[in-house]
Amino acid sequence: MTEIEQLKKWVDESDNIVFFGGAGVSTESGIPDFRSTDGLYNQKYDYPPETILSHTFYRRKTEEFYRFYRDKMLYLDAEPNAAHKKLAQWEAEGKCKAVVTQNIDGLHQKAGSKKVFELHGSVLRNYCEECGKFYDAEYILNSTGVPKCECGGSIKPDVVLYEEGLDQQTIEEAVFYIRHADVLIIGGTSLAVYPAAGLIDYYQGNKLVLVNKTATPKDNMADLVVRGSIGEIFSQL
């Protein structure tokens, strides 16, 4: 039995799948990955992206932050790929109980998934730091300089920047679903970003599946490793 056949068998037999995904799920929708060779880290700005996308930089050089953010973080025309669509289909069939994602692009919801835990927030939500009013991503994209609320306050993306903590409630709910999952599928992530990568340690089952193009530090823990493009693999399930 091939790896994909084994995965298909587990999926077919389960009604309690949880999916944990990273940047590789979005790259196939044309959203660049930070760490890949053609990703954002190799493009030319005055500062490296991880500096620009830090809380300190956001506070000190807000206008420069937004110049980068509009240019490199907002891919509002991106469409869900085969992996997003398959997960939404499984949820509709009662098989997939939750999607836990490190991505901030909202593509899981665009594909139709309802139970999505966004560990790092979403570019689709932005809020006034003074009055709390929410603004969509188009408002940010079409603004200039530092986007302002009608009350005059500055607007901040609802995205977890470097140096900022993850939302505690989101983590607790994600851990609950991971802990109780029958099948845990991890896809498109190098499992190098903590604390997110540490969440998989809460899984207690014996069907831990890693779907990735390259090796990860957790491969030896997995019950099944499937190498390749996550979109191609999911379209065969």
Image: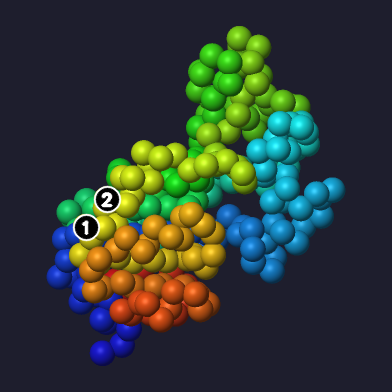
Are dots 2 and 1 in contact, CB under 8 Å? Answer: yes
Residue on which disc 2 sits? 176
Amino acid on which the number 2 mark rests in the picture: Phe
- Residue at x 72% of width, y 26% of height: 146
The x and y percentages for residue 201 are: 36, 64
Q: Residues within 10 Å of mark 1 (few under 14, many from 20)?
A: some
Kind of element beneath mark 1:
helix
The x and y percentages for residue 44 are: 81, 55
The x and y percentages for residue 19 are: 34, 60
Residue situated in front as seen by the camera: 187 or 197: 197
Q: Residues within 10 Å of mark 2 (few under 14, many from 20)?
A: few
Q: Which mark is residue 180?
A: 1
- Residue at x 26% of width, y 81% of height: 6
Amino acid on which the number 1 mark rests in the picture: His
Position of the N terminus by quadrant: bottom left
Q: Residue lying furthest bottom in this view?
A: 1
Between the residue at mark 2 and the residue at mark 1, the CA separation in whole angstroms equals: 6 Å
